[in-house]
Amino acid sequence: MNGPLANEIRQESAYFFTKLVCCSGMADQESLSSLSHRVTDFVSQRGWEVFHNPKDLAIALSVEASELLELFQWRNREEVATVLPEIRRKIADELADIFIYGLSMASSLSIDMEEAVLEKLALNEKRFPVERFRGRAYD
């Protein structure tokens, strides 16, 4: 999706992600690690480790991503722009669910998410150089 509305949605998503990761009352340096430990503790305290295997977590991620998509279903760009202030909290909740399941899956597979994200960004920077892809989604 391109255009002003797409940029607004990207900015909203970035805002919620930043608020979730960086602004939860923890120092920025320890935010991701602290959140990951908090999610692991939450799961452990409830004895849910048996349910938090890679297959089931992948399914849960897909379900939550679908719930996020449902907020935009059947709405054109103008309608989304109109209802965005009303559904902002719901968007944040679904993004949080996705993020929590992602952290839980990373934990279950012993994946360091900070390292994984930095490596993926480095790969994408090579794959999509600015001079070829600025303002374009494909070549």
Image (spheres, helix red, strand yellow):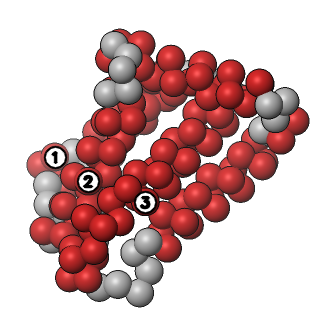
Residue 76 falls left or right of residue 5: right
Query: Which amino acid type is shown beneath numbered disc 3?
Result: Lys
Query: Which amino acid type is shown beneath numbered disc 2?
Result: Glu
Q: Where's the C terminus, which quadrant? A: bottom left
Which of disc 3 and disc 2 is earlier in sequence?
Answer: 2
Query: Which amino acid type is shown beneath numbered disc 1?
Result: Val
Q: Where's the N terminus, which quadrant? A: bottom left
Element class at badge 2: helix
Which of disc 3 and disc 1 is earlier in sequence?
Answer: 3
In the rendered image of this protein, does residue 56 appear above or below residue 40?
A: below
Q: Nearer the viewer, mark 1 or mark 2?
A: 2
Position in image of residue 127 (x %, y %): 33, 45
> Badge 2: few (under 14), some or many (20 or more) residues near its Cα, within 10 Å?
some
Viewer-side residue, 53 vs 97: 97
Which of disc 2 and disc 1 is earlier in sequence?
Answer: 2
> Badge 1: few (under 14), some or many (20 or more) residues near its Cα, within 10 Å?
few
Q: What numbered label is drawn on residue 105? A: none
Q: Residue at x 68, y 28 (%)?
A: 42
Q: What numbered label is drawn on residue 12? A: 2
